Amino acid sequence: MNEALALAGIAANHVNLFQAIRDSDIMGIICLVACLTLSVFSWAIILYKTNQINAASRQSDRFIDKCMSGRGSLEEAYRHTGEYPDSPLAQILREAYLEMQMENWYNDDSYSDEDRFTAARVSLERVCERTISTEIRHLESYLIFLATTSNVAPFIGLFGTVWGVLGAFQSLVTAGSAALSALAPGMATALVATIAGLVAAIPASIFYNYLTNKITILISRMDSFALELSNIMQKRLIKMPPPAAAASGRRY
């Protein structure tokens, strides 16, 4: 057993990827460059999206803590939304608050109480759904490239593998002997392409699943927050006096 481990160590120490790349033919180099390009772009997206999604989660926690530590009023929460530009929850509250203040549907004299409540519910649901959709698109941007890399890179590596094995057999037939030197270029192409495809695909697949899971958690938080915010705003609207009563109580 010790001898087997020693032989494995010797074999590992003699692996020379640069020599294998030099022995590869033009198709092997093309497959290698393609996989490395996918890998470089994938890592750039991984770093960018990890930072973006972590910032969204972190700022959302801070925004909730900030709102809970204050008086709990919508006005105060709205004033804090500008401090957390990466928080999806802050953007939902901001858009919902602006919808309630700018549309002014709850002060329309032509609306009955039931119409006011219906308009409030529909309007708030619409603006929350629109904001959530915008935030989801923002969070999921560029993730499709990771999914594409995890699916395409192994096939590029497989193509290089098949190409290299085919070249090795052709070289063997041409040489007319089983000399290892005749097999070297084709096998180098096959193995380098396989390694390059796996190096590009494995991190892309791992981080795609990791980031998708974190986005799913954020989406769940956004849905819950939007529902709770809609309920708070509708309860606030119920406590408001009807437009006619408010107008009769004005002082001129």
Image (spheres, rainbow, N blue to C red):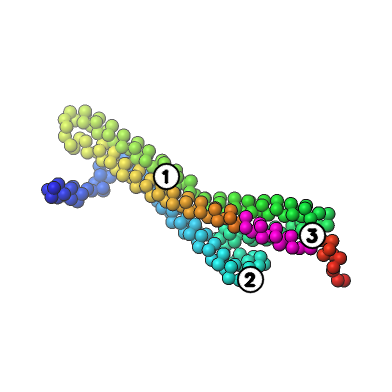
Q: Farthest residue to the left: give it.
A: 3
- Where does label 2 land, which residue? 71
First along the sequence among labels 3 and 2:
2
- Where does label 3 land, which residue? 107
Residue at image point 84% right, 63% down:
245
Q: Quadrant of residue 69?
A: bottom right
Q: Is residue 30 visible?
A: no
Residue at image point 40% right, 49% down:
206
The foreground one among 220 and 105 is 220
Query: In the rendered view, does 211 fall on the left or right side of 33?
Result: right
Q: Secondary structure at mark 2?
A: loop
Q: Secondary structure at mark 3?
A: helix
- Mark 1 to mark 3: distance in Å? 54 Å
User: Which of the two discs, 1 and 3, sits closer to the camera?
Assistant: 3
Q: Are marks 1 and 2 in contact (CB under 8 Å)?
A: no
**Which quadrant, please, contains the C terminus?**
bottom right
Q: Quadrant of residue 24?
A: top left
Residue at image point 74% right, 63% down:
239
Residue 67: give x, y in percent of width and height.
59, 67
Residue 164, label in figure: none
* Figure check: 144 above or below 117: above
How many neighbours does mark 3 have within 10 angstroms: few (below 14), some (14-19), or many (20 or more)?
A: some
- Where does label 1 land, which residue? 149
Q: Hey, what amino acid is under mark 3? A: Asn
Q: Which residues are magenta?
A: 227-242
Q: Quadrant of residue 101?
A: bottom right
Query: In the rendered view, does 3 fall on the left or right side of 196?
Result: left
Residue 115 on the magenta span = no
